[in-house]
Amino acid sequence: MGVVVVAAGRSTRMGGTDKTFAEIHGIPLVVHTLRRLAQSPAVSRIALVVTEDAVARAEGMVSRYAIDKVTAVCAGGERRQDSVYAGLVALGDSQWVAVHDGARPCISEDVLDRALRAAQRWSAAVAAVPVKDTIKVVDDDHVVTDTPERSTLWAAQTPQVFEYGLLMRAHRSASAEYTDDASMVEAMGQSVRIFLGSYENLKVTTPEDLAFVSQLLT
């Protein structure tokens, strides 16, 4: 399957650090992610999406670390869905496609194998893990309005995997802003399934996350 790696965010919670190129053990975070993906037999090629001003730097990085499965580096857009769409176009037609956060460097071969099998079986599926904590729904005054049944709650991750044509149709028909690709596909009336992700498949959002992930990548 092809993979679109999205690394075009603004890193607003990283205290001024661009997490895409933040070093873990002397290697940029996104390189750890790309290496994990490139080592997987489930992955055939990768399109890396970065901010417009980081394209040249990312191309040099891919060349320096010889990540051969990266076949395209392109600039993202204003919204996440714009960046994903740019990556889909740069990737080119692929029967199955996964969208993965560049800031999730601990992706495992097991999860990627489950991702491909889920795409082949269901055409649209999302890596996720069961929620461990009790979740409270609150109003604007921080008053609890609901306590959902925990057994029905899963925390969505990436990769999110789709039949390529299905995801392209979802992007081209999207009339609103979506936080993830699964929501966009769901809006078309397409069922989206869950497959088991991993609690170690963390997304680096804060400097504290960077420190924790560095321990996992030792």
Image: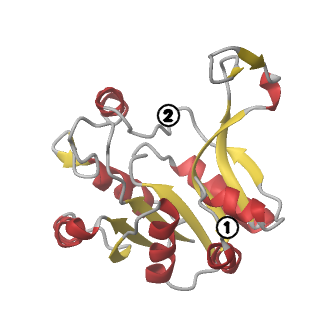
- Residue 92, above or below 151: below
Eyeballing the image, is 185 above or below 106?
below
Judge whether residue 117 can be spotted in this image.
no
Measuring from the top left, give residue 156's x and y in whole percent. 63, 43
Residue 52 placement (x, y as % from top left): 27, 70
Q: Disc 2 designates what residue?
A: 200
Q: Quadrant of residue 1?
A: bottom right
In the displayed structure, 179 sits above or below 3; it is: above
On the image, the x and y values in percent for residue 65 come to: 21, 63
What amino acid type is highlighted by mark number 1? Phe
Residue picked out by circle 1: 162
Front residue of 113/168: it is 168
Give the number of the mark in front: 2 or 1: 1
Label 2 Cα neighbours within 10 Å, binned few <14 / some 14-19 / many ≥20: some
188 in relation to 72, above or below: above
Position of 184 compared to 49: left or right?
A: right
| Picture quadrant of residue 199 | top right
Residues 74 and 122: in front is 74
At x 76%, y 62%, the residue is 187
